[in-house]
Amino acid sequence: MKPWIKKTLMGIFGASIAVGGLTACSSSHSHRGPVSAEKMAEMRAKVVERVGSKLDLNDAQRAKLNVLADKMEAQRAAFIGTTADPRAEMRAIVAGEKFDRARAETLLDEKTRAVQTSSPEVIGALADFYDSLNPEQQNKVRELMQRRKGWLARG
């Protein structure tokens, strides 16, 4: 595979993980503002426990799942950045008579760089976790993804 295709696919995969993580972590809480560190830790523990119980993970697999959760959390934090209010940034872009293209491109570059920087670590952690699963567990992951629009989907 050509290097630019591989990098593009990794970037897209990383962005989808980041967006999925943001959506999962903020879906029911978006109207109340950013999720607190305590609430994030609570949600993460629930997701790890749910995945662990559904796949009947052993201790080594749970450890790899926790590493994956750490990497995804770090990627999410890098994606969000240090901006206290991301909506304020978007309001600033459209505050004037003209759309602030330069500011929008800077914001996009910042978010893209954050995803590209941490995606290899997230992909590596995901691969390590998935590869640690036995064939039965891997099949269960595939079935859950097929049936429920993702293996972490609610319902």
Image (cartoon, rainbow, N blue to C red):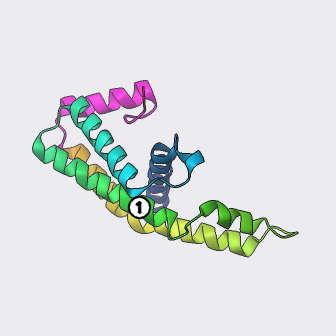
Which residue shows up at 55% across the image and 71% down it?
A: 110
Q: Give, as a three-letter code, the residue at label 1.
A: Gln
Looking at the image, residue 80 lies above or below residue 28? below
Q: Is residue 113 magenta?
A: no
77 left or right of 67 in image: right
The x, y position of residue 103, in whole percent, is 70, 73
Crowding near the residue tagged with mark 1, few <14, some 14–19, many ≥20 C-alpha atoms within 10 Å: many
Name the spot of residue 22 as percent of width and height, x first: 49, 50
Magenta range: 132-153
| Nearer-the-camera pick, 71 or 77 | 77
Q: Could you tell me if residue 128 is visible in this image? A: no
Outermost residue toward the right? 97
Q: Is residue 45 above or below residue 33?
A: above
Work out whether residue 14 or residue 99 is closer to the camera in this orientation and state it: 99
Can residue 148 be spotted in the picture? yes
Q: Residue drawn at (49%, 55%), measured in percent from left and top?
A: 15
In this picture, residue 69 sits left or right of residue 137: right
Q: Considering the numbered disc 1 on the image, is that residue within a helix, a strand or a loop?
A: helix
| x and y percentages locating residue 147 in the rendered image | 41, 24
Q: Main SS of the magenta segment?
A: helix
Q: Quadrant of the C terminus?
A: top left
Quarter placement of the N terminus: bottom left
The residue pinned by badge 1 equals 75
